Amino acid sequence: MLNRKYVLVSVLLIFFGISSLEAASGVNLNIRFFDRRVYFLDQEPIYVLVTITNYSPAPFRFRLADERAFSLDFDTRTAANREVEPASILLRRRSQSQHVFFREVTLETGESFSFVENLREYAALTHSGAFVVQARFFPELLHVADRQFLTFGSVSGTELRVLPGQRPEARPMAASTQPLVSNRLTLNLRHRPVLGPDGIPLQLDVETHAILVRERLPPDEVVRFLITARQRGQWERFFLYLDLEAMLSRDAHRRRQWNAESEEGRQRMLARYREDLQSAVVDGYITLIPTHFEIERTVHTEHEGTVTVMKFFRVGNFTERKRYTWFLERRDDIWMIVDFSVVNLGTQ
């Protein structure tokens, strides 16, 4: 029984030997997003801050390649634990015949060394979703499986150069020590939202889960689309054909403020106006929900149109009637609502 326990403990120690190397050596590899934000599925960089810290009582020496791809690697996996293919630029860098210049770095106890890398230069992030990212740092440079030899040059100080009088010699790239393994990061990649003409992102349709796109509807169908969306509480559809800039500029004070604002300030005004409409702080008539409605008349020219709608609202035991007139303008073959007026017709 004692022998069995001894064998089991020995096997476990061997199995976890590599993973515990970092803890045993007292050298820590940590990664975090350099500028944590929402990441989209385009070629915008995803910067990762890599930090090596020496917690051991002895100095820690390592080689750092000028081309970081020979010192660092990222293991990037999907939520289903499928490994993400390496980026094409990474494959080119590691497959070319070249000199690999490096510098010798020494970290005393308590010292850290950091640098920033773009994750997109290591992993081919070609689809949206959740990913788990983990880094590996090779103190004696990376072993490239499909290449046996590369030539190396040393560096001195902060300037990379081949040592005077020394001719670079071919030597194996195999690392002489185990790599340092970092913590894991969770990366969420999203599709960049499509912006409407007013600069407001078009949201996903809650029914189809697709990005809403304006269609070439006639003026009466545009108004019907807006009212129906409000009845169903579908705000993303409600705002689809509503020109927020034109609606905002109906008020003289807001129009003067709009003209005085910068582009960034105007975007803030649009976002705030949209929120105020949704909470009925301004132009409350537009967001009232009718029990039913009837489109009475539609008149339009090539570029302008009006649609008259009778709306019915339940108030206690009575039904209140209001006649809405919607004003539309045609832009790039899309009819947009730019204004409205309301006449109260009493109850019945």
Image: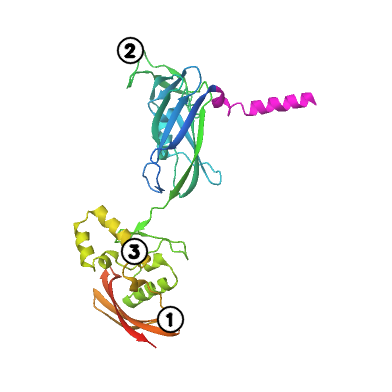
Magenta stretch: includes residue 5: yes
Q: Residue at x 40, y 45 (%)?
A: 37
Q: Secondary structure at mark 3?
A: helix
Residue furthest to the bottom in view is 348
- Compared with 56, 146 (above or below) is below
- Relative image position of residue 188 (x, y in whole percent): 46, 47
Q: Residue at x 36, y 44 (%)?
A: 44
Location of mark 1 (residue): 314
Q: Secondary structure at mark 1?
A: strand
Q: Nearer the viewer, mark 2 or mark 1?
A: 1
Q: Nearer the viewer, mark 3 or mark 2?
A: 3
Left or right: residue 8 versus residue 282 is right
Can see residue 14? Answer: yes
| Circles 1, 3 touching at the beta carbon (< 8 Å) | no
- Relative image position of residue 265 (x, y in whole percent): 26, 54
Tell me the tag on residue 276. Answer: 3
Mark 2–mark 1 Cα distance, whole angstroms, equals 91 Å
Q: Residue at x 46, y 64 (%)?
A: 206
Locate the N terminus and report the quarter of the image it occupies: top right
Left or right: residue 91 versus residue 8 is left
Q: Amino acid at mark 1?
A: Arg
Location of mark 2 (residue): 164
**Image: magenta residue range:** 1-24
Q: Which badge, 3 or 2, comes first in the chain's sequence? A: 2
- Compared with 280, 169 (above or below) is above
- Relative image position of residue 108 (x, y in whole percent): 44, 19
Q: Amino acid at mark 2?
A: Pro
